[in-house]
Image: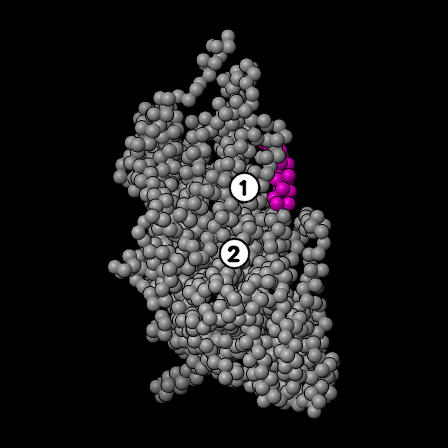
Amino acid sequence: MKFKHLLLALATSVALVGPGLAAEFKIGLNEDPDLLDPDQARSFVGRIVFASLCDKLVDITPGLEIIPQLATAWNWSDDGMELTMDLRQGVTFQDGTPFDAAAVVANIDRSQTLPESRRKSELTSVEKIEATGDHQVKFTLKAPDATLLAQLADRAGMMMSPTAFNASGLDFANNPVCSGPFSFGERVQQDRIVLNKYDGYWNADAIHVDKVTFLPIPDTTVRLANLRAGDLDMLERLAATDVKSVKADPNLSEAEAVSLGYQGITVNIANGAGAGSPIGNSKLVRQAFSWALDREAINQVVFDGAFAAGNQPFPPTSPWYTKDLPVPPRDVAKAKALLKEAGYDKVDVELTVANNPVNQQLGQVIQAMANEAGFNVSLKSTEFATLLSAQSAGDYQTDQIGWSGRIDPDGNIYSFVVTGGGLNDNDYSNPEVDKLLNEARTNNDIATRKSLYDQANHILDDELPIIYLYHQTWIWALSKDIKGFVPYPDGMIRLEGVTKG
Amino acid sequence: MLRYIGKRLLIAIPTLLIVSIFVFMLQKILPGDPALVMAGEERDPQVIAFIRAKYHLNDPLIMQYFYWIGGALRGDLGISLRTNQPVLVLIGQKLPVTIQLAIMSMIFAFAIGIPAGIISAIKKGTIIDYVANIVALSGLSIPNFWLGIMLILLVSVQLGWLPASGFEMFTVDPVRSIQTMIMPAFVLGTGLAAALMRHTRSAMLGVLKSDYVRTARAKGLSENVVILKHAFRNALLPIVTLSALLFGQLLAGAVLTEQIFTIPGFGKLIVDAVFNRDYAVVQGVVLCTAFGFIVMNLIADILYVLLNPRMREGA
Amino acid sequence: MTTIAIETLPEQDVHSENRAWAKLKASHSAMAGAVLVVFFIAIALLAPVLPIADPTATDWGAVRKAPSALHWFGTDEIGRDLFSRMIWGAQASLLAGVVSVAISVAIGVPFGLISGYFGGWTDQIISRITDALLATPFLILAIALAAFLGPSLTNAMIAIGLSSMPVFIRLTRGQVLAVRTEDYVEGAHAIGLSHTRIIARYILPNVFSPILVQATLTVATAIIAEASLSFLGLGQQPPAPSWGSMLNVAKNFLEQAPWMAMWPGAAIFLVVIGFNLLGDGLRDALDPRETD
């Protein structure tokens, strides 16, 4: 009799304790996010927090296909000027406000009209948005825009509770309310951000973590030390040179995804004081520089082979990569011949790099390689803020700089090489390229777009306004008991399906 | 006494003004455009224009200075460009952290430095003195960021005794607070302990030779009493005044230590602010540290005056 | 009358000079410090003529190799010989220390002299500015100056020099104040010697000793300051070596290549201890009150 009671008690307690075990997750970040307001946010690391805090209209697969999240279906009109979206039903924001078409309209409105909004440039093509039903919205565009869906898969498409942002205005970031799997708990600047599981989440079954704490730890060595010591469950942006040791560690595991962005050398063609150099004036000299570099060796020496060598705005793993323009090997003879053809024996090049150890190492490797092919590279190490201004004003000859990357290929190429583009820091201008890229961003057909980008890539590979070098790989290190993590090329940590222990 | 304090506070005002002008100019001549840094990757020209207008970045420098100093006098130190928080709030959050770090470092420094200094003075010329001197000098000579990293590798990763980073206020969770702050306090404290030890030693040496100690010995008092009651108390004066000054310098010395151990304190705040061209934060923080430094100096001088007559009466 | 006044004015005492020198030589720790300092200065000066590898020669195949017969100190992150970089790095680190202090002294001492000697409003203004400089956290000042001037060794030296200057102004001023009211100075006034002569002949020699001691000790802090600035990316820029920037890079490879951090860390430590020991020894030797 007593024994049966005991057994029953044990069974019940185990049943109660089982699912009740609070799984707490600690994630180490490379920086402290800026503002937790999707409209005002401007950092990559902030997006990692948003991935748990805010749901978006659409999301992506690791293969970069657009899939439903808060929007369940969508339709373009034949002329590409209207986009109709059906919204998911039964969704509420973390403060109880129902998610509906009116909420979406209010969100897009805020993104477009708030003076501090950094999302305006992402939604320039949207003329207006209206609710065509309780759970349906229609975007009307000023001109066809093939990139719009991709924009809605990022911060522009993150839905915030209108009740919250109407009440708090600019201070929304101090207490953000969205509709994602976790709601805002607390934040101590430069110390931690705590999110708690939102039980009313529409996909709550996929979430097996009760609390997420983000800890910004800028020093990569210290961040890894924290993981090893058990004070973190996972970290983002593991240093490439630490990959080998993490792989050899039985208590840790590692995940990778080639990023969407690129790193390269922007050559000042016609912008300000830095223009007029031999390398800026002659495409032959730029080609020579490119042939002088051994991209695989750079990857090996500086990043222990963990990154991906590249020669286009898209990584070789991307569906948009132009396959008949493979990453070139090093060819010093060819480089020297090209220099001669351009009329030079030796060319002086000033390369500006950011003043952190990794970029400086990269600069020195580039310098050593190019110097063997007839160049005389001098390195100019600059602080980040100064680098930005110098770049914008044209106070540089060549600049080692990159781009974090966007889901849509247009985001990696358009603003940089189009005449007068917002991020065109070298004043490169080719009407043929302009034509191709303008057409590519208004045409919704993937095959057509691919062909247009291929043509553009061929021209860019010949003229080399940007000498692409490599693509960063997002590398995560995890504690062995974390299972179910899927690496995405956008670098985000999606906690759906992730379990601990 | 009150007149003395009053006079000193009066002198502090032009000093603070000069500091404010100085740090303001320093910020403004730094190359790099904060609006560009704050605008984000996409560099939307609309946003940049908006930021420049909102934070008066287009106004002539003199106007910008008066906007700021006027606000400062009313208690409004401006807004951080990076986080939109009022600078005063940021300082309010970070200062207690650094102060806790400073206090813990001072405890280390006192606990190690003063006894070491006393023993070294008593045993002057012997091996103990020699070794103590070398150890003290080592404490002064090791770059503290270097010491910090080595400690993390050894204590957190290899031995697993203490967490590698992070932080908790003492008032929230005392145990965890001490765990996370012990290493950084040690790193900061070693340099201070060294300085304290050397000053204690030389102050004690000076006093041990003095008349009243000779008198005490002549009176037949035991050596321990002589040392603790008479010598040390008189040596206390320069030690106390030095400590007040060191406390002020600690705030500045915490910069690199907070960087390594990821402690969200004053030092980290200001380094990040300089690199992000977050003008308001840098100006506000420097003004506060300058004020704190002046106050510390004043306390040191007052202590000096207070302790002196009492010393003379006591002997 | 005049003759007698001049005779009573104290000149530089030959005996006290010898006594100081003798005391210095007798102190073991001061001599140890001197040996260290001389050793590192010698290395720095001899770097160009020593038969060592090119400190900027890269070698992809020899990245982060442990110390061996080929590379006595091992190689760094792009295959350069560490032994050579350590020796050449001595130039940067020692320059950083010595030049910064030279700047501090060259600007600080004259201002201190003027401030202490002339008093009045000049003194007030200079003192308030010095207070303001002292009240600004040293490293922040250095960081801001280095950021303004641009990251480079020269600019780091200027930044550190300017940030260390207030101490010398204060020190000099204090010494001048102590000496200014002495009888022999009053006497010099009375016989009509010019300010410059008075300062040069009677005040400077008294100021010399404490300045020397402080300068030696400040070289130590300046070397650490350069390492700190390099740690933040504001000091010596690549490919030229400096111990501080080598430490900055080495911290990312502590596990894979600990030797990269060992050498510069040890070198900074030793050279700083050397200057500290020497400075202490000088203080003891030159202090007229020390009686043993």
Q: Are marks 1 and 2 on the same chain?
A: no
* Residue B122 visible, this angle: yes
Residue at 36% from the left image edge and 56% from the top image edge: C54
- The spot of residue B224 in percent (x, y) is 32, 34
Comparing A28 with C179, the one in front is C179
Outermost residue toward the top in this view: C1
Q: Are marks 1 and 2 in contact (CB under 8 Å)?
A: no
Is residue C229 a member of the stretch shown in magenta? no
Residue at 32% from the left image edge and 43% from the top image edge: C39
Residue at 40% from the left image edge and 65% from the top image edge: A225
Is residue B2 a member of the stretch shown in magenta? yes
Which residue carries the number 1 mark?
C134
Q: Label 1 amino acid?
A: Leu
- The spot of residue B12 in percent (x, y) is 61, 39
Q: Secondary structure at mark 1?
A: helix
- Rendered-image quadrant of the N terminus of chain A: bottom left
Picture quadrant of residue A292? bottom left
Residue at 43% from the left image edge and 42% from the top image edge: C98
Report crowding for label 1: few under 14, some 14 to 19, many 20 or more residues within 10 A (C-alpha).
many
Which residue carries the number 2 mark?
B268
Q: CA distance from mark 1 to mark 2?
A: 20 Å
Relative placement, left or right, of B199 versus B86 is left
Picture quadrant of residue C287? top left
Picture quadrant of residue B59? bottom right
Outermost residue toward the bottom in this view: A78
The disc numbered 1 marks a residue on which chain? C
Q: Which residues are magenta?
A: B1-22
Q: Label 2 amino acid?
A: Lys
